[in-house]
Image: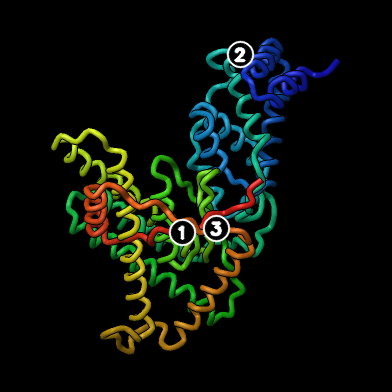
Amino acid sequence: MEPVTDQAFAAALYSDGDAGLDTGASLLAADPTADAELLRRGEEFVRRAWERGWQPADVVRLVRRDLDETAACLAAGLIVSETARYERLPPRWRAQLDGLPDAPPRNRPDRFSYASAVLGLYRLLLRLPAIEPVGPPPGAAPHGLHLPPAHDEPRMLTRIRALLAKAEATGFPEEAEALTTKAQELMARHSIDEALLAARTHSKEAPGACRIGVDAPYETAKAILLDAVAAANRCRAVWNSDLGFSTVVGFEPDLDAVELLYTSLLVQGTVAMTKAEAGQRAGGRKRTKTFRQSFLMAYAQRLGSRLAADTARVTAAEAGTGAGAGPEGSGGPDLLPVLAARDMAVKDTAGRMFPETTTTRVRGATDLDGWTHGTAAADRARMGGNGPELRGGHGRR
């Protein structure tokens, strides 16, 4: 006789309707001996996701978006149990695992409801498309796309994270501006130091990649903001709007800088937008969607140019070419060729990973008040966005 799990999967996983899920859940609920096999099959589906280029945070983010928080917690439980079997995990995985939600108790609130939720999750996992890998799967040796972090990275990241946390928490715009600017300057100098060290030691370090979620609503504006942060930190971002993330390509210290700064600027922008929106409502305004969209578009656009200017200023000072720059520049005349070579390496890596991309022109903002408030918020954050163009990955399966 066909095992219960096979019967349940045949009914639930290869159809789109709720009837199949109910049938499969009923079969599993009636047979407690199927529980162990159900878990084993789930771990197998997660393992297939790794082989298709997915990472833990990617899976949980997509499950949460397409199903619900319960399914995301179920997925997290499977991920934790599946990854426990590996002696070696790729870079960034440990941090992703530490950030997962707790798995819910099994067979709660009842066996049928639990089995139904599990089968819905398995149906989604089974249909995950293959995506561009940004590192080796667990258990494999690191390859050229992702190398271990630099030896002094935790100390530098701790300093940058502390500055950005203070910028997010302060109620004084001038203080937030100074803190965020200092964080970007540290990022730029750290990137320069790493580039010079790699050149002097003839390091074979290659660009890596990471994925950063770009969640609705207003995901276009958020993707533009991430693109601006990436460009200012010598990285390239490619947005996959269908799957809700951008892949950022760059050298390891720059990838960490992008992730930290984008997250902080998004927090700062959201707080400023909420405050500005409250003022609009107090003045009698009722519709806020166009205001928010225009606010975030202006915030992203303004931040891009300011971030780029900050990086250019630090680079010129370190190279000894900026206004007022003296011989104390750490890089001297060798710096600019070193940075140009790294820029070309990032460009080539991104081109290999994404041979087919498109540049999409974004619809202009339609709310003048939102645009004005967003620009002002960007000025207070001392940051800026890249203009109304995005690179979007094509060819997803």
Q: Which residue is mark 2?
A: 112
Left or right placement of residue 162 versus residue 240 in this view: left
What percent of the width, then of the height, locates residue 322?
31, 83
Task: Say above or below: 68 vs 316.
Answer: above
Task: Give the total number of marks visible in the rendering.
Answer: 3
Which residue is outermost to the top? 30
Compute the Cα span from label 1 to label 2: 43 Å
What percent of the width, then of the height, locates residue 383?
30, 61
Q: Residue at the location (23% across, 62% down)?
A: 178
Q: Counting residues from the N terminus, which is met first, the one under dot 1 or under dot 2?
A: 2
Can you say which quadrant of the picture contains the C terminus?
top right
Q: Which residue is mark 3?
A: 358
Nearer to us in this view, 347 or 290:
290
Q: Counting residues from the N terminus, which is met first, the one under dot 3 or under dot 2?
A: 2
Can you say which quadrant of the picture contains the N terminus?
top right
Disc 1 is placed on an element classified as helix
- Name the image quarter holding residue 317: bottom left
